[in-house]
Image (cartoon, rainbow, N blue to C red):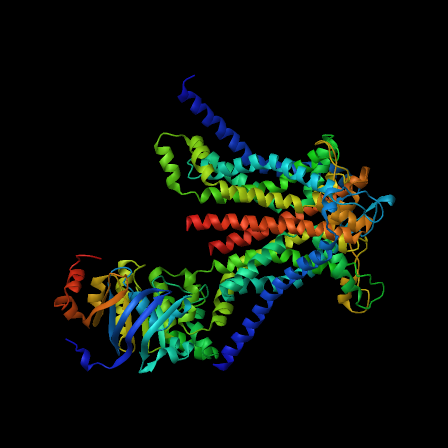
Amino acid sequence: MNKRSFAQNTAFGIFWLTGATAVLIMVFVVGYIMVKGLPGISADFFTTSPRGGLSGEGGIYSTIVTTFYMIVVTLAFATPLGVGAAIYLTEYSANTESRVVRKLVILARFGVETLAGVPSIIFGLFGYALFVTALNMGFSILSASLAGACLIIPVIIRTTEEALKSVPAGYREGSLALGANRWETTWKVVLPAAFRGISTGVLLSAGRIVSETAIFFVTLGGSYRVPHSLMSGGRTMALHVYYLAMETRAFDKAMSTAAVLVGMIILMNLIINTITSRISAKQG
Amino acid sequence: MTPGIRRTGIEKTMKMVLMISALASVLIVLLIFLFTAKEAMPAFREIGIGKMLSDTTWRPGNNQFGILAMIAGSGLVTLGAVFIGVPLALGTAVFLSEIAPLWVAKIVRPSIELLAGIPSVVYGLFGMVVIVPWVRMIPAPGNTGYGLLSASIVLAVMVLPTIANISEFAVRSVPRGYKEGSMALGATKWETISRVIIPAAKPGIISAVVLGLGRALGETIAMIMVIGNSVILPTPVTSNPLSIFLSRARTLTGNIAVEISYATGVHESALFATGVILFILIMLVNSSARFLMRKGARS
Amino acid sequence: MSKLETEVTRMKAEDYCLFYGNFRALNNISIEIPTNRITAFIGPSGCGKSTLLRSFNRMNDLIPGVTTTGTVYLDGRNVAQEDVVELRKNVGMVFQRPNPFPKSIFDNVAYGPRLHGTRNRSDLAVLVEKSLKRAALWEEVKDDLHKSGMSLSGGQQQRLCIARAIAVEPEVILMDEPASALDPVATLRIEELMNELKKNYTIAIVTHNMQQAGRVSDYTAFLLTDENRAGNLIEFGPTKQIFTTPSDSRTEDYISGRFG
C-alpha cells in the first residue's frame, strides 16, 4: 500500500513541477522583456519615428501607424469573408438534404483546416509571388494585408462558427416561425446574438497580425517611414523588432519595442477573456 | 417589385455570396499551391527534384541548389524541440486536467495562453539575448551559441501551448465512466491516470504532438534569429554525437525568408521549390494528425 | 418473509447527511444493509438514492465541495477512517452505463487484481476465468479474451463490469441502476445473475424500476425529497412488506404510481 501511495506522490510531485515550470517560463520570458524593455520607453518613444542609424535612434511612431494600418486593412479583407463562410457552414448548410451542398461543405471544411495548417512563410511566399510581383502591387500594405488575410481567415471562421453555434436554436425558430427567411433571421437575430463571440475572433485575429513577422518580412518591404497610402511599404512593430535585433543590432530598442508588443498582447488576452467569461456567465 | 419578391431575391443572392465565401478557403489553398508550384517549375525542370533533395550544397552563385542541409536543419531542430517540449507539454496537460486544484489551474492556464500569444519575433529576441549566451557557455570548438540547441529550446517553448492545449482536451474527453470505474476498483488517482486515462487519450495526445511537429516545421522568424543560418549539413562538433546540436544550421523556412527578397531566376525558383516541398511536408504531417484524431474519436 | 432483526449487518449508515456546498442532499439517513441479501434503494429522480449508494464506497469523495456528517460503517468500522483504496477493494461498484475500459476483456477483469498486487500470469488467468464464470459471461467470451471489452453488446459489457468488480473479491457490490441502459432480455440476465451472486456477496442496488426492485430484492428502502429538496429515508423493510403493506402513505403513493 505504501508503495502505491509513494508512486502517486512521486508522480504528482513531478506533475506539479511541470505545471510550475510552464508558469515560470512565462514569468521569465515576459518578465525579462519587461524589465529590459520598459526603462527605454517614454512618451517620445511612441511619438517619434525611427531615424535609422547604427544604434536605431528614434522611437516607434511609424511602426505603430503601420501596424494599425495592417490591422485595419487585413481585417477589412478577412472579416466579411470569414464571417460569411461561417454563416454558410452553420446556418445554411446544417441538416441539408442536398448532396451537392453536403459535398461543398466537406470541401469547404477541408479548405479551412488546410489553410489553418499552412505555415506563415508560405503565405508570405504566395503573397510575394502573386501580389508583390505578378499583380505589381510591390512591397506594400496592400500586398501584405492580402497575404495576412489568408492567415486569419481560418481563425475568424472557427471563432464565428463557435459563436453562431452557441446561439440557442429557439431564437432561429422564433424568427423563422414569424415568416422571416434564413438571411433575415441570420442578420437580425443570430448575428446580433453572436456579436460578442465574433468580436473575440476579430480581436484574436488582430493579435495575430500584431504578432506576425514572417509574412510581412517578405511582402511589406521594411521601410521605417510613415506610410501615406495602401501602396506604401512599411514595417510593423514586430518587423521593427526583427530589424533592430538582426540588422541594426540595437538590442535595447528591440527590447523596448518587444515590451510594447507583449503589453499589447496581454491587454488583448485580458479583453478576450473578459468578453468570453461574460458570454459564459450570460449562458450559464 | 413587391416586397415578397425583393425579399426572396435578397435571400437567394446572400445564399450565393455566403457559399462563395465558404469556398474562398479552398480557393486560396488552391491558388497558393498553384502559384508556388508554377514558380517552382523552372527549378524542378532545370535542377531536378531528386538532385535538390539529395544534394547538400546550396550555392546560388554557383548554380548549386541542394536543400538536404536545410531539410536536416529543420528536422533536427524539430526533433530537439519535441524532445524538450513534449514532456513539459504533456505533463502540464495532465496536471491541468486531472491534478491541479481550480485556483492553480487559474494561474497555469492563462500563463500558457500568454505563451501562445507572444510573437515569434519576441521569442527570437529572447533567444538571442538569453538562450544563446547560455549555450555559448558550453565549451566546444567553434560554439558561438547560435545553432540547433538554442533554436530547439526556443522552439520547444513555442510549441508547448499547442501540444499542451490539444492534449489537455484529449485527456478531458476521456469518458468519466472510465475514471469512476477504475477508482471504484480501488485504484489510486495516479493508477487511474496512468493505466486508464492516458491510454484512452493516447490517439489525441499523439495527434497533439504531431500537430506541434507541424507548427515547429513551419516556424520561421525565431529560427532565423537563433539558429545561425549557415547552410551546412549539421555534424557533431566534438566526439559526442549529441554535440551535433551545437552545430549551426538553416531551416527550410529560414532559407526562403532570408533569400527571397533578392533572388532572381533559377535561384528564386529554387526558393519557391523549397516552399513547395515544405508545404507538402507540413500537409502530410497535419493530415496524419487529423487522421489520428478521427481514428481516436471513432474508437 | 425475512425479518431484519435476524440478519447480519454488513454495512450501515447512521445519522448520515451529505452536502453539496451548502445544499443538503441527504438528510439524517440511518439504514442497515444485511449480509448476503439484495437491498434495493427506490424513489423518484433526484431523491438521493444514487448519492446514498455512492456513500458506501466513498465515491462522493471525488466530487469537489462534498461534505458529510454522521457515519457509514463496513463490518462495524467507520469507512471514513478506512484507507479508501482498501474500502473500495471491499466494496465494489457497477455503474448505470456499462463502462468497460478500452482494453481487452482479459485486461478489464485483471485490472483490479493487478492493482492489488497479483502479477503472476497464471494466477490472473485463474482469477479472470473464475470472475467471468461468476458473472455468467465466460461461455460467451472464453475464446475472445484478447478482444476489446468495448466490442461486446451492452448486456455483455455490464456483465464484464460485474466480473471486473468480482475479480478483486469484494464483500459488497453496489449497483447503480445496472440495467437501465439495457434491453429487457439483457436486464433479465442481470437480474438472474444478481440472485446467483447474493450467495457470496452483499448487494445494494439503486433502481427506478419498481418491478425490478420487487423481483430481485429482499429489502427495500424508499427515499423521497422533503420540502428543501433534501433526500430522506421514508421507509425501510422487507421488500414484500414495502410493496404490500407499506406503513407510510407516501410509500404507498409511490408504489402505486401516484407520483414520481
| Residue lying furthest right | B62
- Give the x, y percent position of residue A76: 60, 34
Question: Eyeballing the image, is B194 above or below A122?
Answer: below
- As rendered, which of C240 and A11 lies closer to the eye? A11
Question: Eyeballing the image, is A160 above or below A232?
Answer: below
The answer, for residue B242, to whether it is visible in the render is yes
- Give the x, y percent position of residue B112: 59, 57
| Residue lying furthest top | B1
In the displayed structure image, the side of residue B139 where residue A25 appears, left or right: left
- Give the x, y percent position of residue B76: 72, 58
Total residue callouts: 0
In the displayed structure image, the side of residue C163 where residue A99 appears, left or right: right
In the displayed structure image, the side of residue C86 where residue A229 appears, left or right: right
Question: Eyeballing the image, is B163 above or below A93?
Answer: below
- Can you tell which quarter of the image residue B128 is in? bottom right
- Can you tell which quarter of the image residue B110 is in? bottom right
- Residue in view at x 51 percent, y 29 percent: B16
Quadrant occupied by the C terminus of chain C: bottom left
- Residue in view at x 43 percent, y 16 percent: B1
| Residue lying furthest left | C245
Question: Eyeballing the image, is C150 above or below B254?
Answer: below
- Give the x, y percent position of residue B249: 78, 56
- Residue in view at x 21 percent, y 62 percent: C210
Quadrant occupied by the N terminus of chain C: bottom left
